[in-house]
Amino acid sequence: MLTGDGDSIASHQPRPWRSSRRPSAEYVAEHKCAEVTPHIARNTFASLLASAGVSIYKIAQWLGDDVRVVQKHYAKLLPKDEDIESAFRSERKIRREKTTNAK
């Protein structure tokens, strides 16, 4: 789409990721530390939330991702629920006993 002066609208759109790169690069150079890209910051944000027990559904909403994508990447970081873990252990024990008795 063109503006009245013939330029495209896209050329007038701000690009926030570019504006954050220069200060970031200057900080990294000055402090001799690793650069934190927007991707790393996003991943750290989601990982910390999942580790703190925040709902996968909330994390997905905040990231703007589908719940299945967030579950795939961050569900392993959720704190363990002892009641659920205990139920799974009991179920495995019952299944083992059934297979042992069937032989």
Image (cartoon, grey):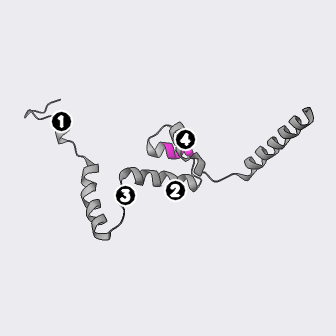
The type of residue carrying mark 2 is Leu
Q: Quick one: label 1, few (<14), some, or many (20+) residues within 10 Å?
A: few
Q: What element carries label 1?
A: helix
Residue under the point 80% across and 42% down: 92
The tag earlier along the polypeptide, 4 or 2, is 2
Q: In which quarter of the image is residue 21?
A: bottom left
For the N terminus, the image quarter is top left
Q: What stretch is highlighted in magenta?
A: 56-60
Q: Do the residues labelled 4 and 1 touch (CB within 8 Å)?
A: no
Q: Which of marks 1 and 2 is in front?
A: 2
Quickly name the residue at label 1. Answer: 9
Q: Residues within 10 Å of mark 4 (few under 14, many from 20)?
A: few
Residue 72 image label: 4
Upstream in the sequence, badge 2 or badge 3?
A: 3
Q: Please, what secondary structure does the residue beneath circle 3 have? A: loop
The amino acid type, in three-letter code, at marker 4 is Lys
Residue designated by label 2: 48
Q: Nearer the viewer, residue 3 or 50?
A: 50
Q: Are marks 1 and 2 in contact (CB under 8 Å)?
A: no
Q: Does the magenta stretch include residue 17?
A: no
Please give the label number shown on residue 36: 3
